[in-house]
Image (cartoon, rainbow, N blue to C red):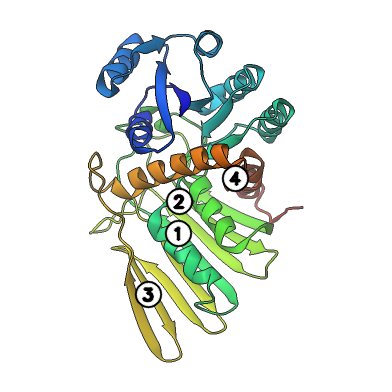
Amino acid sequence: MLKGALIGCGFFAQNQMHGWQAVEGARIVAVCDRDAERREATARRFGIGRGHDDAARMMAEEDLDFVDIATTVGSHRPLVEAAAEAGLHAICQKPFAEAMQDARAMVAAMDRAGKTLMVHENFRWQSPVRATIRALREGAVGRPFFARVSFRSGHDVFSGQPYLATDPRFIIQDLGIHILDIARALFGEVTGLAASTARINPAIRGEDVATMLLDHASGVTTVVDCSYATRRQPDTFPQTLIEIDGDAGTLRLDAGYRLVIQRDGREEVREVAPPVLPWAERPWHNIQESVQIIQQHFVDCLREGRPPETSGRDNLGTLALVEAAYASARDGNRIALP
């Protein structure tokens, strides 16, 4: 049984703790947060006997195999490097890093330590998205050439995470990173990107609308669009909607978790709605299920000695798209990627 510790006991970390309770082969034995009230509340809620206010000291004192880093982005590099120094595997929340140099340094530190580093990039692990990826790889539409990956909502994300309203970077860094990662999971690496952004909500600091055009090395063109300023009913939060055109047919992941495949004059509809886990609640159940799935994947990879799909090294490709999108929106040009 692998033993882990949670670092950061905030809003989303509660989902991670629920997920860990259902993961086979691992358990959380300690939690860490500088805020005593949050730390103690999380420990009580999940029956964790040991709480800490200093992550480095916890890593030194506890008998651990891994840490789950669920803190804000500015703390990720020192915490990952501390995990490497302590000889621990790590799963780290997204966004992985504030800058590419920090992300590369974290990957290098864990490589030197011979430990596994995975990014908690859970959107590509949502069961409706996995069903879409499987259908595409099984040739449902033949050779794809165009896609749209879309997340548009008016949901109030600031009530649970108020810091999002104060960050100069908002929707691409917080949400778009997930949607860009789905595009990479579907169609592979990107050779060029153009982006535009807008701030519709005057009460926030960063952008809340972004539209990105991606050219993939595979020959696919993808439109990735994100909005937290869209007013429509019913609101589709937190669903990612996907359209794919191929030379043999079309595929859509529609609202309501319906996967529609049209080919050879026929239409097939697959219901791919995620289950509502015992601890989950609508409409968050889609994301909550993916938390449990990705954490199980992390543990399976540790036990089997294989790299995780959303490894730190893989996430460098997604983070590069985030940086390119901000540069393109700022300068008004297309960014070529290596």
In the picture of the structure, the residue carrying the numbered disc 3 is: 260
- In which quarter of the view is residue 236 placed? bottom left
Q: Which residue is disc 1 drawn over? A: 130
Q: Counting other residues with Cα less than 10 Å from the Cα at mark 3, is it few (<14), some (14-19), or many (20 or more)?
A: some
Q: Secondary structure at mark 2?
A: helix
Label 3 or label 2, whichever comes before in sequence order: 2
Is 101 on the left or on the right of 58, as rendered?
right
Q: Nearer the viewer, residue 89 or 106?
A: 89
Q: CA distance from mark 3 to mark 4?
A: 30 Å
Give the label, 1 or 3, closer to the camera: 1
How far from the left and from the top, in percent, is residue 255?
Answer: 31, 64
User: In the rendered structure, which amino acid carries the disc numbered 4?
Assistant: Val
Sequence-wise, the earlier of marks 2 and 1 is: 2
Q: Amino acid at mark 2?
A: Trp
Q: Amino acid at mark 1?
A: Arg
On-image quarter of the N terminus: top left
Check disc 4 and report the residue beneath it: 322
Q: CA distance from mark 4 to mark 2?
A: 19 Å
**Contact between labelled residues 4 and 1, with CB atoms less than 8 Å apart:** no
Closer to the camera in the image, 301 or 275 = 301
- Could you say whether the residue bearing mark 1 is in a helix, strand or loop? helix
Give how far apart the Cα atoms at labels 1 and 3 are: 14 Å
